Amino acid sequence: MHQDPLCTNAWNSLIMGCKLWIFMSPNVPKDIALGTQFRTEVESKVEIEDEAVGWYHRVYPSIRKWFMQHCPAEYTLIEVVQYPGETIFVPNTWWHAVLNINSDTLSITHNYVSSSNFTDAWRSMRIERPHTAQRWRHALSYMEPATFTRLVNIDRNDKFVCDILKPKYCCQYY
């Protein structure tokens, strides 16, 4: 179970085989999505719980039971089986896990940023990958001036400054 990096959206098109997807809305707390609150102390030390197969077979049943019995209405849990020819859209910040049901499974996936998730992606990028963010910022300044202006306004509103040209590289809020 994870959220995609840098607040990106993603799509996954299945060519062959079947996949089981589990989605949870972004507002589901991390300890519930990852199942940490449902594991015993011994299970928490077993790495298989962090792999897809272990998570699906040993952790997910407890999460699913909790959702059925105690889940607040504002949390969402979705289970989907994907078949060949189908494309799944993964919105940014949604928790998700996927398990290949067949031994022969082939899919194509791509993570991306669009206008709908640009603000979240930019905020994530500038902290997690500051050098890449600066290259992206520079490219947007001449390739997408409207998006660049949006980026400048986001930084200004957040009171965020990043200057990789300084000798002691720094990114900070002022």
Image: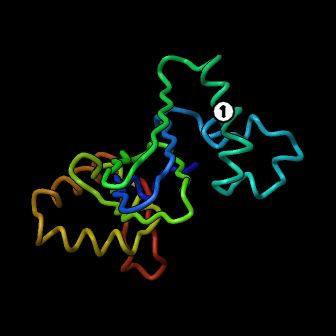
- Give SS at disc 1: helix
Which quadrant of the view contains residue 71? Answer: top right
Residue at the location (52% across, 41% down)?
A: 22
Pick the residue in front: 64 or 9: 64
Number of labels in the image equals: 1
Pick the residue in front: 128 or 28: 28
Q: Residues within 10 Å of mark 1 (few under 14, many from 20)?
A: many
- Residue that numbered label 1 is attached to: 63
Which quadrant of the view contains residue 112? Answer: bottom left
What percent of the width, then of the height, locates residue 28?
54, 33
Kindly identify the amino acid type of the residue bearing the numbered disc 1. Ile
What percent of the width, then of the height, locates residue 142?
11, 72
Residue at the location (11% across, 70% down)?
A: 143
What percent of the width, then of the height, locates residue 119?
29, 49
Pick the residue in front: 121 or 31: 31
What percent of the width, then of the height, locates residue 11?
33, 55
Residue at the location (68% across, 48% down)?
A: 55
Residue at the location (22% across, 73% down)?
A: 138
Q: Is residue 145 left or right of residue 14?
A: left
Colouring of the image: rainbow
Q: Is residue 172 left or right of residue 68?
A: left
Can you name the residue that lies furthest to the bottom here?
A: 167
Q: Is residue 46 left or right of residue 170?
A: right
